[in-house]
Amino acid sequence: MNYKLIIPILLVLTSSLIAGPSKISPDLSVLGAGNVNVIIRFSVIPGAHENNKVKSVGGSLTRVLRSARAGLYSVPRAGLLRLAADSEVQYLSPDRGMRAKLEYAEPTTNANLAFAQGIIGNGITVAVIDSGITAHDDLGGSAASRILFAQSFVSGDTTTDDAYGHGTHVAGIIAGNATDSSGSQYTNTFRGIAPGANLVNLRVLDENGQGSDSEVIAAIDEAVALQSIYNIRVINLSLGRAVYESYLLDPLCIAVETAYQAGITVVVAAGNEGRDNSVGNYGYGTIAAPGNDPYVITVGAMKDNGTIDRSDDTIASYSSKGPTPVDQIVKPDLVAPGNLIISALSSDNPTLAQTSSTAVPLSFYESAAPAGNSASYYQLSGTSMASPMVSGTVALMLQNDPTLTPDIIKARLMLTASKTFPASSSVTDPASGITYVSYYDVFTVGAGYLDSWAALNSTATGGGVAISPSVVPVAQGQAQFVSPVMPAGETAIWGSTSIWGSTSIWGSTSIWGSTSIWGSTAIWGSTSIWGSWSPSAQSAIWGSSAIWGSNTASDDAQSVAIALHGE
């Protein structure tokens, strides 16, 4: 059966772009009349002094965004250039639209082995920044709920329940305890990765799965503020939007880095645009923000193919691929199950559940079941579902050793990820008839396939920052890792020697092997999608209009629908 999920996307694009180096983001138009909602980043958290600068051009403050050292303002377009000329203003960007990134997964990741040892995430809290979480039996019910705190950042809507259906599903993957599928009458049990973990519900997406940068940044601010109160050690962001500038400028990336610096591990969905060949790059260079930030853990999606045996698992062709636009960061960092994942269903008749394609028949998991579909579970596909697999694993690691830092957690996850893959796999979309071929290179599977038990048992340590490297081409079929910009005095945890060497983290045979990414018949070949190699090539992925070139945006505001197919 083919399962299809339509996820709406709102991209706010502009008709006039500012060319060249500028404090104004490339998708923020300074032309036209009226006000525009702008995130203005200063060198400090804005106060009265900074707000008065905006007020002097006719603008007004809507919300302070502490983690980004910014504020959301309503500003006349005519005042944008004047603000950009101010030495205390660092960057201006629009309040961009955000969207959600949409059985057998737990044993596939080997998290069931941790469960058998009593490691279930006890005492660790994961902040789920999503479409809300509705009380569910698998999350403790209303009487003994493990949702410790809830707040809505959706403009004009204070409710924290999940009208879209995405956040509850994500929460179930992280922390569901299978209350509604445990017992002698059940033939399948749907348990999350860390069924003892607590949750903080920070709602930023509305009933259509849409939100904005400022709402997400405000939720990150709240997670950092509540960190010590609820022992928030993980933030899960199963959402994203297009990349418009370097992560060094993007206020959303700056916000996730603030959480990382506070000691919170940030896990982000890679995106679901791996099938996008609109610019001739076969889905490469489609990682979404803030998954393009090198400090976070960015997760792509695998298909478990309905078995607990990892050997038949394949990459989901829709999973977004690196390197990242603008900065060419090697992403994703790793991959995890994300296709046709069964998890908690919000009781609010959510938008995503209003289609038969997401339903789970009662007969699928209950013996002698009556006819009809489950009111407790349904299935969704996407990197949105892969990210909470990793967030749950982080909760297990932290219960086992609360002293772990975000850097050691990320490094251990990547070091222990399985690096055994086929050279390629393919799938034909039954709706379109298009066949998609996936290669298991570093830009598709990162450091490998999540192994929760191996990560939990790793004792590897080391100094430095687990920052995802950039990649630069040096010759046809050859490239090298380089470290992105790092603060003075900091070094990357993986060097050319010791256990953190590149061949340990990324694997010397499956990722870098002669028949994989670097092979003449794979994606770097002269007849493949990379095109004939040239540093100044104007076509394929090397071209100025693709990931190695300057970033541009289209010129119309539009609403786009992305179809994800359960393959």
Image: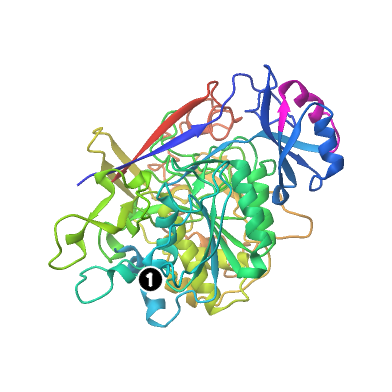
Q: Which residue is mark 1?
A: 177
Q: Residues within 10 Å of mark 1 (few under 14, many from 20)?
A: many
- Please state which of residues 268 and 535 is positioned toward the viewer in this rendering: 268
- Please state which of residues 10 and 275 is positioned toward the viewer in this rendering: 10
Q: How is the image coloured?
A: rainbow
Q: Is residue 533 visible?
A: no
Instruction: Report whether 415 appears left or right of 258.
Output: left
- Give x and y (percent) for residue 351: 37, 43
Q: Residue furthest bottom?
A: 117
Q: Please tell me which residue is depicted at 34% across the width and 63% down the height of the picture.
A: 105
Instruction: Report whether 412 appears left or right of 29.
Output: left
Boundaries of the magenta span: 74-88
Q: Is residue 235 magenta?
A: no
- Give x and y (percent) for residue 192: 39, 67
- Give x and y (percent) for residue 53: 84, 34
Q: Please tell me which residue is depicted at 67% across the width and 16% down the height of the picture.
A: 32
Instruction: Report whether 348 appears left or right of 103.
Output: right
- Please state which of residues 133 and 251 is positioned toward the viewer in this rendering: 133
Q: Is residue 85 magenta?
A: yes
Quarter of the rendering containing residue 251: top right
